[in-house]
Image (tube, helix red, strand yellow):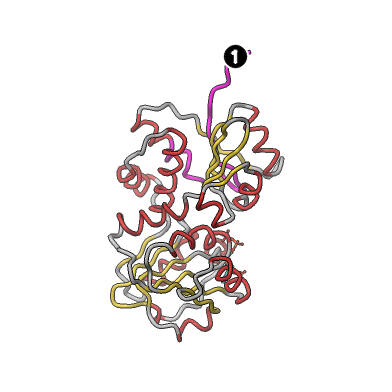
Amino acid sequence: MPPKVPHYAVLGQPVAHSLSPQIHAEFGKQCGIAVIYLRLDTSELGFANTLARFAKAGGVGANITAPHKTEAAQLCQSLGYRAQQAGTANTLIWRNGAWHGANTDGSGLLRDIRERHGLSLENRRVLLIGAGGAAQGVAPALLETGIAQMVIANRSLPRATALLERLGAPDKLHACTLEALPDMGSFDLILQATSAGHHDQPLPLPAAILGQDSLCIDLNYGRAALPFTAWARSQRCERVADGLGMLVEQAADAFELWHGIRPDTAPVYNKLRISARL
Ligand code: ATR
Protein backbone atom coordinates (compact mmCIF):
# COMPACT_ATOMS: atom_id res chain seq x y z
CA MET A 1 0.00 0.00 0.00
CA PRO A 2 1.44 3.43 -0.86
CA PRO A 3 2.22 5.60 2.19
CA LYS A 4 -0.57 7.96 3.10
CA VAL A 5 0.20 11.60 2.33
CA PRO A 6 -0.26 13.72 5.48
CA HIS A 7 -2.93 16.25 4.88
CA TYR A 8 -4.93 18.93 6.63
CA ALA A 9 -8.49 20.20 6.42
CA VAL A 10 -11.08 22.58 7.74
CA LEU A 11 -14.30 20.89 8.86
CA GLY A 12 -17.54 22.75 9.22
CA GLN A 13 -20.99 23.40 7.89
CA PRO A 14 -20.78 25.39 5.70
CA VAL A 15 -17.08 25.54 4.72
CA ALA A 16 -17.33 26.58 1.06
CA HIS A 17 -16.36 30.15 1.85
CA SER A 18 -13.66 29.38 4.40
CA LEU A 19 -10.42 31.27 3.78
CA SER A 20 -8.39 28.71 5.76
CA PRO A 21 -7.19 26.69 2.71
CA GLN A 22 -5.83 29.86 1.14
CA ILE A 23 -4.20 31.01 4.37
CA HIS A 24 -2.45 27.66 4.96
CA ALA A 25 -1.34 27.50 1.32
CA GLU A 26 0.26 30.96 1.71
CA PHE A 27 1.95 29.98 4.98
CA GLY A 28 3.23 26.79 3.34
CA LYS A 29 4.71 28.73 0.40
CA GLN A 30 6.38 31.14 2.78
CA CYS A 31 7.91 28.33 4.88
CA GLY A 32 8.78 25.99 2.01
CA ILE A 33 6.29 23.31 3.08
CA ALA A 34 3.97 21.65 0.54
CA VAL A 35 0.63 21.74 2.35
CA ILE A 36 -2.35 19.68 1.23
CA TYR A 37 -5.35 21.36 2.85
CA LEU A 38 -8.96 20.45 2.11
CA ARG A 39 -12.41 21.78 2.85
CA LEU A 40 -14.67 19.11 4.35
CA ASP A 41 -18.35 19.87 4.64
CA THR A 42 -19.87 17.76 7.39
CA SER A 43 -23.50 17.98 6.26
CA GLU A 44 -23.51 14.56 4.61
CA LEU A 45 -21.76 12.32 7.14
CA GLY A 46 -21.96 14.39 10.31
CA PHE A 47 -18.94 15.73 12.17
CA ALA A 48 -17.65 12.61 13.96
CA ASN A 49 -17.82 10.41 10.85
CA THR A 50 -16.23 13.03 8.61
CA LEU A 51 -13.37 13.42 11.09
CA ALA A 52 -12.90 9.65 11.44
CA ARG A 53 -12.81 9.16 7.69
CA PHE A 54 -10.36 12.04 7.33
CA ALA A 55 -7.98 10.44 9.89
CA LYS A 56 -8.22 7.10 8.12
CA ALA A 57 -7.24 8.71 4.82
CA GLY A 58 -4.11 10.28 6.32
CA GLY A 59 -5.48 13.45 7.90
CA VAL A 60 -3.09 14.69 10.58
CA GLY A 61 -4.41 18.16 11.36
CA ALA A 62 -7.84 19.77 11.29
CA ASN A 63 -9.28 23.20 11.81
CA ILE A 64 -12.78 23.10 13.19
CA THR A 65 -15.31 25.79 12.51
CA ALA A 66 -18.97 26.35 13.42
CA PRO A 67 -20.94 24.52 14.61
CA HIS A 68 -18.54 21.75 15.69
CA LYS A 69 -16.02 23.25 18.11
CA THR A 70 -17.65 21.80 21.24
CA GLU A 71 -18.10 18.35 19.73
CA ALA A 72 -14.50 18.48 18.51
CA ALA A 73 -13.27 19.06 22.06
CA GLN A 74 -15.38 16.15 23.29
CA LEU A 75 -13.88 13.78 20.69
CA CYS A 76 -10.29 14.56 21.66
CA GLN A 77 -8.17 12.29 23.80
CA SER A 78 -6.45 15.29 25.36
CA LEU A 79 -6.93 19.06 25.33
CA GLY A 80 -4.51 21.97 25.63
CA TYR A 81 -4.99 24.61 28.32
CA ARG A 82 -7.10 27.05 26.28
CA ALA A 83 -9.30 24.30 24.82
CA GLN A 84 -9.93 22.97 28.32
CA GLN A 85 -10.84 26.43 29.58
CA ALA A 86 -13.17 27.19 26.66
CA GLY A 87 -14.60 23.68 26.35
CA THR A 88 -14.13 24.05 22.60
CA ALA A 89 -11.37 23.18 20.12
CA ASN A 90 -10.64 24.86 16.80
CA THR A 91 -7.42 22.97 16.01
CA LEU A 92 -6.89 19.21 16.12
CA ILE A 93 -3.61 17.32 15.90
CA TRP A 94 -3.45 13.60 15.16
CA ARG A 95 -0.88 11.94 17.41
CA ASN A 96 -0.39 8.28 18.37
CA GLY A 97 -3.70 7.21 16.91
CA ALA A 98 -5.89 9.88 18.54
CA TRP A 99 -6.93 13.50 18.19
CA HIS A 100 -5.54 16.15 20.51
CA GLY A 101 -7.30 19.51 20.68
CA ALA A 102 -6.18 23.10 21.00
CA ASN A 103 -8.03 26.38 20.92
CA THR A 104 -6.10 29.13 19.16
CA ASP A 105 -9.01 31.59 18.80
CA GLY A 106 -8.17 33.46 22.01
CA SER A 107 -4.44 33.68 21.36
CA GLY A 108 -5.14 34.72 17.76
CA LEU A 109 -7.47 37.49 18.87
CA LEU A 110 -4.98 38.76 21.47
CA ARG A 111 -2.20 38.94 18.90
CA ASP A 112 -4.47 40.81 16.51
CA ILE A 113 -5.46 43.32 19.23
CA ARG A 114 -1.95 43.90 20.52
CA GLU A 115 0.18 43.66 17.41
CA ARG A 116 -2.06 44.70 14.55
CA HIS A 117 -4.09 47.31 16.43
CA GLY A 118 -1.46 48.31 18.99
CA LEU A 119 -3.75 48.11 22.02
CA SER A 120 -2.27 46.95 25.30
CA LEU A 121 -4.96 45.35 27.43
CA GLU A 122 -3.77 46.17 30.96
CA ASN A 123 -6.44 47.96 33.00
CA ARG A 124 -8.81 48.24 30.04
CA ARG A 125 -12.58 47.97 30.11
CA VAL A 126 -13.74 45.34 27.65
CA LEU A 127 -17.23 44.73 26.29
CA LEU A 128 -17.90 41.27 24.91
CA ILE A 129 -21.18 41.21 22.98
CA GLY A 130 -22.52 37.66 22.77
CA ALA A 131 -22.21 34.59 24.97
CA GLY A 132 -22.32 31.74 22.43
CA GLY A 133 -19.52 29.60 21.04
CA ALA A 134 -17.49 32.48 19.60
CA ALA A 135 -17.55 34.47 22.85
CA GLN A 136 -16.80 31.37 24.90
CA GLY A 137 -13.74 30.64 22.76
CA VAL A 138 -12.02 33.99 23.32
CA ALA A 139 -13.18 35.01 26.81
CA PRO A 140 -10.69 32.96 28.90
CA ALA A 141 -7.66 34.37 27.08
CA LEU A 142 -8.99 37.94 27.40
CA LEU A 143 -9.48 37.52 31.13
CA GLU A 144 -5.82 36.67 31.67
CA THR A 145 -4.42 39.85 30.15
CA GLY A 146 -4.70 42.19 33.14
CA ILE A 147 -7.90 43.89 31.94
CA ALA A 148 -9.77 45.90 34.56
CA GLN A 149 -13.24 44.61 33.72
CA MET A 150 -15.15 42.65 31.13
CA VAL A 151 -18.87 43.11 30.62
CA ILE A 152 -20.57 40.23 28.84
CA ALA A 153 -23.72 41.53 27.15
CA ASN A 154 -26.07 39.06 25.54
CA ARG A 155 -29.59 39.05 24.13
CA SER A 156 -30.58 36.45 26.72
CA LEU A 157 -29.25 37.10 30.21
CA PRO A 158 -29.08 33.44 31.38
CA ARG A 159 -26.50 32.63 28.71
CA ALA A 160 -24.36 35.64 29.67
CA THR A 161 -24.57 34.63 33.32
CA ALA A 162 -23.68 31.03 32.47
CA LEU A 163 -20.54 32.21 30.65
CA LEU A 164 -19.63 34.45 33.59
CA GLU A 165 -19.98 31.53 35.99
CA ARG A 166 -17.95 29.26 33.78
CA LEU A 167 -15.13 31.81 33.63
CA GLY A 168 -14.84 32.43 37.38
CA ALA A 169 -13.15 35.76 38.28
CA PRO A 170 -16.46 37.39 39.38
CA ASP A 171 -14.62 40.54 40.52
CA LYS A 172 -13.69 41.31 36.92
CA LEU A 173 -16.88 40.23 35.20
CA HIS A 174 -20.38 41.56 34.81
CA ALA A 175 -23.21 40.01 32.80
CA CYS A 176 -26.07 42.03 31.34
CA THR A 177 -28.61 42.18 28.54
CA LEU A 178 -28.19 44.34 25.43
CA GLU A 179 -30.93 46.62 26.79
CA ALA A 180 -28.81 47.36 29.88
CA LEU A 181 -25.84 48.59 27.82
CA PRO A 182 -26.71 52.33 28.00
CA ASP A 183 -25.95 52.16 31.75
CA MET A 184 -22.59 50.37 31.45
CA GLY A 185 -20.36 53.32 30.56
CA SER A 186 -17.81 53.34 27.74
CA PHE A 187 -15.26 50.68 26.81
CA ASP A 188 -11.68 50.66 25.49
CA LEU A 189 -12.32 47.48 23.53
CA ILE A 190 -15.65 46.30 22.09
CA LEU A 191 -15.85 42.79 20.64
CA GLN A 192 -18.87 41.73 18.60
CA ALA A 193 -19.16 37.96 19.03
CA THR A 194 -22.80 37.26 18.18
CA SER A 195 -24.02 35.57 15.01
CA ALA A 196 -26.61 38.31 14.36
CA GLY A 197 -24.67 39.54 11.31
CA HIS A 198 -24.96 36.13 9.67
CA HIS A 199 -28.70 36.71 9.52
CA ASP A 200 -28.34 40.40 8.55
CA GLN A 201 -29.81 41.34 11.91
CA PRO A 202 -28.59 44.63 13.38
CA LEU A 203 -27.89 44.84 17.12
CA PRO A 204 -29.51 47.58 19.18
CA LEU A 205 -26.30 49.18 20.47
CA PRO A 206 -26.14 52.57 22.22
CA ALA A 207 -23.49 55.15 21.26
CA ALA A 208 -22.66 55.45 24.99
CA ILE A 209 -20.51 52.28 24.86
CA LEU A 210 -17.98 54.08 22.64
CA GLY A 211 -15.21 56.08 24.29
CA GLN A 212 -12.81 58.61 22.72
CA ASP A 213 -10.47 55.98 21.37
CA SER A 214 -12.38 52.69 21.52
CA LEU A 215 -11.22 49.78 19.39
CA CYS A 216 -14.18 47.89 17.86
CA ILE A 217 -13.65 44.42 16.42
CA ASP A 218 -16.23 42.09 14.94
CA LEU A 219 -15.05 38.49 15.32
CA ASN A 220 -16.73 37.64 12.02
CA TYR A 221 -15.38 38.64 8.64
CA GLY A 222 -16.98 39.38 5.30
CA ARG A 223 -20.64 40.19 5.09
CA ALA A 224 -21.44 38.96 8.61
CA ALA A 225 -19.21 41.66 10.11
CA LEU A 226 -20.85 44.50 8.20
CA PRO A 227 -23.80 45.45 10.45
CA PHE A 228 -21.52 46.04 13.46
CA THR A 229 -18.56 47.61 11.64
CA ALA A 230 -20.93 49.91 9.71
CA TRP A 231 -22.62 50.91 12.97
CA ALA A 232 -19.27 51.68 14.66
CA ARG A 233 -18.13 53.77 11.68
CA SER A 234 -21.45 55.60 11.61
CA GLN A 235 -20.71 56.63 15.22
CA ARG A 236 -17.39 58.14 14.02
CA CYS A 237 -15.35 55.44 15.68
CA GLU A 238 -11.97 55.46 13.93
CA ARG A 239 -10.64 52.11 15.10
CA VAL A 240 -12.90 49.49 13.55
CA ALA A 241 -11.95 46.05 12.25
CA ASP A 242 -13.48 42.73 11.29
CA GLY A 243 -12.23 39.28 12.31
CA LEU A 244 -9.81 38.74 9.41
CA GLY A 245 -6.83 39.58 11.63
CA MET A 246 -7.91 37.07 14.25
CA LEU A 247 -8.54 34.46 11.55
CA VAL A 248 -5.02 34.79 10.15
CA GLU A 249 -3.43 34.81 13.61
CA GLN A 250 -5.31 31.73 14.86
CA ALA A 251 -4.32 29.99 11.61
CA ALA A 252 -0.66 30.87 12.27
CA ASP A 253 -0.92 29.25 15.71
CA ALA A 254 -2.42 26.12 14.14
CA PHE A 255 0.30 26.09 11.46
CA GLU A 256 2.98 26.28 14.16
CA LEU A 257 1.37 23.43 16.13
CA TRP A 258 1.33 21.24 13.01
CA HIS A 259 4.59 22.15 11.31
CA GLY A 260 6.75 23.60 14.08
CA ILE A 261 7.38 26.86 12.20
CA ARG A 262 5.80 30.21 12.86
CA PRO A 263 4.77 31.99 9.63
CA ASP A 264 4.80 35.75 9.13
CA THR A 265 1.13 36.77 9.13
CA ALA A 266 1.41 40.36 7.83
CA PRO A 267 1.90 39.58 4.11
CA VAL A 268 -0.86 36.95 4.16
CA TYR A 269 -3.26 39.32 5.93
CA ASN A 270 -2.50 42.10 3.44
CA LYS A 271 -2.92 39.80 0.45
CA LEU A 272 -6.28 38.49 1.70
CA ARG A 273 -7.56 42.00 2.35
CA ILE A 274 -7.03 42.76 -1.30
CA SER A 275 -7.83 39.43 -2.97
CA ALA A 276 -10.89 38.55 -0.89
CA ARG A 277 -12.05 42.19 -1.09
CA LEU A 278 -12.58 42.29 2.63
P1 ATR B 1 -21.56 31.16 17.70
O1 ATR B 1 -20.81 29.86 17.77
O2 ATR B 1 -21.46 31.86 16.37
O3 ATR B 1 -21.25 32.06 18.86
P2 ATR B 1 -24.00 30.41 19.02
O4 ATR B 1 -23.24 29.61 20.01
O5 ATR B 1 -25.30 29.91 18.51
O6 ATR B 1 -23.12 30.74 17.75
O7 ATR B 1 -24.23 31.88 19.67
C1 ATR B 1 -24.85 32.88 18.96
C2 ATR B 1 -24.72 34.18 19.74
O8 ATR B 1 -25.26 35.25 18.96
C3 ATR B 1 -25.50 34.19 21.04
O9 ATR B 1 -24.84 35.06 21.94
C4 ATR B 1 -26.84 34.76 20.58
O10 ATR B 1 -27.62 35.33 21.61
P3 ATR B 1 -28.60 34.38 22.50
O11 ATR B 1 -27.70 33.63 23.44
O12 ATR B 1 -29.49 35.34 23.20
O13 ATR B 1 -29.32 33.50 21.53
C5 ATR B 1 -26.37 35.83 19.65
N1 ATR B 1 -27.34 36.26 18.65
C6 ATR B 1 -27.72 35.60 17.54
N2 ATR B 1 -28.62 36.34 16.83
C7 ATR B 1 -28.81 37.48 17.54
C8 ATR B 1 -29.61 38.66 17.34
N3 ATR B 1 -30.40 38.81 16.28
N4 ATR B 1 -29.53 39.64 18.25
C9 ATR B 1 -28.74 39.52 19.33
N5 ATR B 1 -27.95 38.43 19.58
C10 ATR B 1 -27.99 37.43 18.70
Count residues near mark 1 (Cα–Cα under 10 Å), then give few for <14, some for 14-19, many for 20+.
few
Q: Is residue 23 covered in magenta?
A: yes
User: Residue placed farthest to the top in the image?
Assistant: 1
Q: Is residue 217 left or right of residue 85?
A: left
Q: Residue 190: image x %, image y %?
A: 41, 70
Q: Is mark 1 within 8 Å of ligand 1?
A: no
Residue 172: image quadrant is bottom left
Query: Which part of the image, by quadrant, shows the N terminus?
Result: top right
Describe residue 55's horizontal placement relative to residue 135 as left or right: right
Q: What's the residue at 62%, 47% (across, down)?
A: 72
Q: Tell me the kind of residue under disc 1.
A: Pro
Vertical comparison of 142 with 94: above or below:
below
Give the residue displayed 30% in from the left and 42% down from the top: 267
Instruction: Please name the residue shown 45% across and 38% down the image.
Output: 257
Q: Nearer the viewer, residue 130 or 43?
A: 130
Name the residue that disc number 1 marks. Answer: 2
Q: Which segment is the magenta one?
A: 1-24
State which quadrant residue 115 falls in. bottom left
